[in-house]
Amino acid sequence: MAVQQSPSYFGKLACLFGFLLLFHSGYSTFEHLSYLKAVDGHESGLPTDIVVELLVSVAIFGLGIVLVADNFKEILMETEMAKQSIESLDARPSFYSFNHRGRAVFRNVVLKK
């Protein structure tokens, strides 16, 4: 079995910081559009600082996701199945059948002693 790595704290911190920046850029966009609506201004696009904040927040959030994510698994099923034991493969409770038709089929059969 592969050793599980714990997610880095720097990655978690980058995710949190990126998310907060993303939230702030969304709030700034909402405030800018509501200001334009209040002064009857026409939309000429977002200010550059909001766009830059959005791009930086997406980059930081993406970096945090990459640092927190676990290792990739193999695409081929054979390599994943080779890592498991036969006991874990055979123990599938969904295939156990306790309600079968044996009692109904052999109801009239008399066993000789």
Image (cartoon, grey):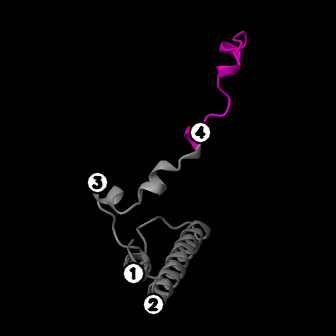
Which tag, 2 or 1, sits closer to the chain's start? Answer: 2
| Amino acid type, mark 4 | Tyr
Which tag, 3 or 2, sits closer to the chain's start? Answer: 2
- Image marks 3 and 2: residues in contact by CB distance under 8 Å: no
**Distance CA(mark 3)–CA(mark 2):** 35 Å
Q: Is mark 3 on a helix, strand or loop?
A: helix
Where residue 111 sits: x, y (%)? 69, 16
Disc number lying in front (2 or 4): 4
Q: Residue furthest top?
A: 108
Identify the residue under disc 4: 96
Looking at the rendered image, the quarter that the N terminus falls into is bottom left
Q: Residue 67 carries which label?
A: 1
- Image marks 1 and 3: residues in contact by CB distance under 8 Å: no
Q: Which residue lies furthest to the front in this view?
A: 113
Of residue 41 and residue 59, the one placed in the foreground of this image is 59
Of residue 68 and residue 92, the one placed in the foreground of this image is 92
| Amino acid type, mark 1 | Leu
**Distance CA(mark 1)–CA(mark 3):** 28 Å
Which span is picked out in magenta? 94-113
| Amino acid type, mark 3 | Glu
Q: What element carries label 1?
A: helix
Q: Residue 79 carries which label?
A: none
Disc number lying in front (3 or 2): 3
Q: Please identify the quarter of the rendering in which residue 30 is found.
A: bottom right
